Image (spheres, rainbow, N blue to C red):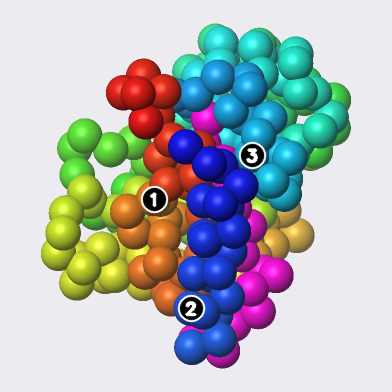
Amino acid sequence: MNVKENYQQIRSNIEEICQRCGRNPDDIHIIAVTKYVSVDRANAALEAGVIHIGENRDEGLNMKHEELGEKATWHFIGSLQTRKVKQIIEKVDYIHSLDRLSLAIEINKRATKPIKCFIQVNVSGEESKHGISPGQVAQFVDELKQFEFIEIVGLMTMAPFTEDTKIIRTCFRKLKELQLEIQALSQLNAPCNELSMGMSNDYKIAIEEGATFIRIGTALVGNESRGV
């Protein structure tokens, strides 16, 4: 597994897609999802040029942050239990899974600086996925304006795991439409300029539909638990 070559290939793919879609490749940020790899593999991603590291468990984030610290911009991308907020809040720059008021209360209580948050939206409606429904987002954004340490920088979703690209594209397109609706509210706490969507199997479609942060694990750093 050559992380540098993987990163260069992904960057090349991004440039090709953006040229085709009339987008600026500098607007696409790659998050290396390091859940299934060692600190060494995460560090290899940073040395290859990656800036953003994403973890979906507090233990993994804390362990890698202890070793790599300020070398990375840190993203918590998994479902976040309220009781776990205090264990990660001083280490993260972004939280991608804000989906309930109780979590917002805890983040605001524990934070000592503004935290850039994505509202997680369950666009597909799958019961197995976390996130609020699209119809709840506007009200949720309004409720969040009371919290001084929460900045809603964007929306996040996960598309269904399927080979049907039409289903995937529809999911991402709906999130983009919802982003525009939230931006139109012009709320100071919710500039909502970012879209976190797309993973190893579907990031190309996500970019075509407006993603600004893509969360790449296997295609970038591999999966050491499976010997990849």
Q: Nearer the viewer, residue 225 or 72?
A: 225
Residue under circle 3?
45
Task: Look at the image and give the residue range highlighted in magenta.
Answer: 21-34
Is label 1 or label 3 in front? Answer: 3
Q: CA distance from mark 1 to mark 2?
A: 15 Å
Q: Which mark is residue 100?
A: none
Where residue 119 sits: x, y (%)?
51, 46
| Residue at (56, 42) in percent of width and height | 3
Count of marks, rendered view: 3
Where residue 187 sits: x, y (%)?
69, 62
The answer to whether residue 5 shows anywhere in this view is yes
Crowd class of label 3 (few under 14; some 14 to 19; many from 20; radius 10 Å): many
Q: Which quarter shows the C terminus?
A: top left
Where residue 43 sits: x, y (%)?
68, 30
The answer to whether residue 135 shows anywhere in this view is no
Q: Which mark is residue 200?
A: 1
Residue under circle 2?
17
Q: CA distance from mark 2 to mark 3?
A: 22 Å
Crowd class of label 1 (few under 14; some 14 to 19; many from 20; radius 10 Å): some
Is label 2 or label 3 in front? Answer: 3
The earlier-in-sequence mark between 1 and 2 is 2
The earlier-in-sequence mark between 1 and 3 is 3
Amino acid carrying label 2: it is Ile
Crowd class of label 2 (few under 14; some 14 to 19; many from 20; radius 10 Å): some
Q: Is 156 a magenta residue?
A: no
Q: CA distance from mark 1 to mark 3?
A: 15 Å
Is disc 1 placed on a helix, strand or loop? loop
Classify residue 176 as left or right of residue 91.
left
**Is there a contact, CB below 8 Å, between mark 1 and mark 2?**
no
| Residue at (16, 54) in percent of width and height | 162
Amino acid carrying label 1: it is Ser
